[in-house]
């Protein structure tokens, strides 16, 4: 009797363990399937998020002169005014603006110095000087007041070629950027590189809104849906 009883108990235990193993395997399978579904549902991170441009972190005139050591590229086109610069007097003609720097315009800064600030006797402008067609021009990259420098060149200029920083962009996108054109499907950042400063026209969140680009006198209205250009129309 006892041997048969123990045999029945062993059988029951084996069956119970087998059922538990099957249930555990099913639970693990379900969890793995759900994890795969969630992974597929989450969109891939934008490669642009991984681009970290180098900065110079200038804090005085000497460190600001690091701008002369390599070419620079304008971050936000049509937002920076530049002025004629008199080499002999080392003065900028602030009364006659020469123009606006273009989107992703490449510049070779040859010097950085200070100049008077119109209407502010106690303050001086920190000016970056460059040449174009044999003429000298300057644009502000900071200010000096009471011996304290405020420099914002890192927010204005790339010190690396944007073509290299964003080399993961498709070739046709870079062609449009270099021609200062917009293509359907471009991102806000790509359009900013092509057209420069964009002004929101509604209260939509980034990625789903309308921006107006002055575009050097030929304004465009660009509508974004899910972070991409959905339509482009001429603005006023």
Image: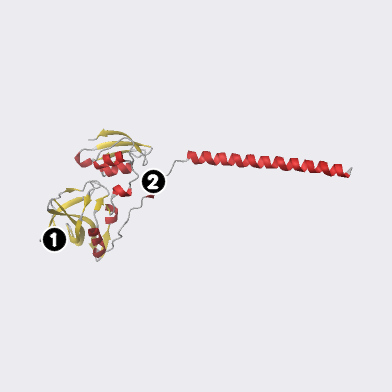
Image location (x, y in percent) of residue 46: 39, 44
How was the colour assigned to the protein in this rendering? secondary structure
Mark on residue 205? none
Mark on residue 90? 1
Q: Is residue 163 visible?
A: yes
* Residue pictured at 37% horizontal, 46% vertical: 48
Q: Is residue 121 visible?
A: no
Image location (x, y in percent) of residue 99: 17, 48
Q: Is residue 139 above or below residue 181?
A: below
Compare residues 83 and 191 and report the one nearer the observer: 191
Q: Hey, which residue is sitting farthest left in the picture?
A: 88
* Residue pictured at 75% horizontal, 40% vertical: 15
Upstream in sequence: badge 2 or badge 1: 2
Query: To which quarter of the image does residue 117 belong?
Result: bottom left
Contact between labelled residues 1 and 2, with CB atoms less than 8 Å apart: no
SS of the residue under disc 1: loop
Query: Image quadrant for the C terminus?
Result: top left
Query: To which quarter of the image does residue 7 belong?
Result: top right
Compare residues 173 and 74 and report the one nearer the observer: 173
Mark on residue 47? 2
* Residue pictured at 29% horizontal, 49% vertical: 162
Q: Hey, which residue is sitting farthest bottom in the picture?
A: 147
Q: Hey, which residue is sitting farthest right in the picture?
A: 1
Query: Image quadrant for the N terminus?
Result: top right
Image location (x, y in percent) of residue 149: 26, 62
User: Local crowd at mark 2 within 10 Å, few (<14), some, or many (≥20)?
Assistant: few
Compare residues 172 and 79 and report the one nearer the observer: 172
């Amino acid at each position: 009797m006892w041997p048969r009883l123990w045999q029945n108990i062993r059988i029951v235990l084996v069956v119970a363990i087998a059922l538990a193993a099957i249930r555990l395997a099913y639970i693990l399978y379900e969890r793995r399937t759900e994890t795969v579904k969630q992974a597929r549902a989450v969109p891939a991170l934008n490669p642009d998020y991984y681009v970290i441009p180098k900065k110079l972190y200038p804090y005085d005139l000497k460190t600001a002169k690091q701008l002369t050591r390599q070419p620079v590229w304008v971050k936000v086109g049509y937002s920076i005014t530049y002025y004629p610069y008199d080499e002999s007097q080392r003065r900028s003609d602030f009364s006659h603006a020469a123009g606006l720097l273009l989107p992703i315009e490449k510049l070779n800064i040859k010097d950085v110095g200070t100049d008077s600030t119109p209407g502010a006797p106690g303050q001086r402008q920190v000016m970056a000087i460059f040449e174009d067609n044999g003429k000298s021009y300057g644009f502000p990259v900071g200010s000096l007041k009471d011996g304290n420098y405020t420099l914002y060149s890192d927010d204005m200029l790339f010190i690396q070629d944007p073509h290299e920083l964003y080399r993961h962009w498709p070739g046709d996108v870079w062609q449009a950027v270099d021609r200062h054109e917009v293509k359907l499907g471009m991102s806000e950042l790509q359009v900013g590189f092509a057209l420069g400063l964009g002004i929101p026209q509604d209260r939509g969140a980034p990625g789903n809104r309308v921006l107006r680009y002055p575009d050097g006198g030929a304004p465009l209205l660009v509508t974004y849906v899910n972070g991409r250009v959905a339509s482009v129309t001429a603005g006023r």
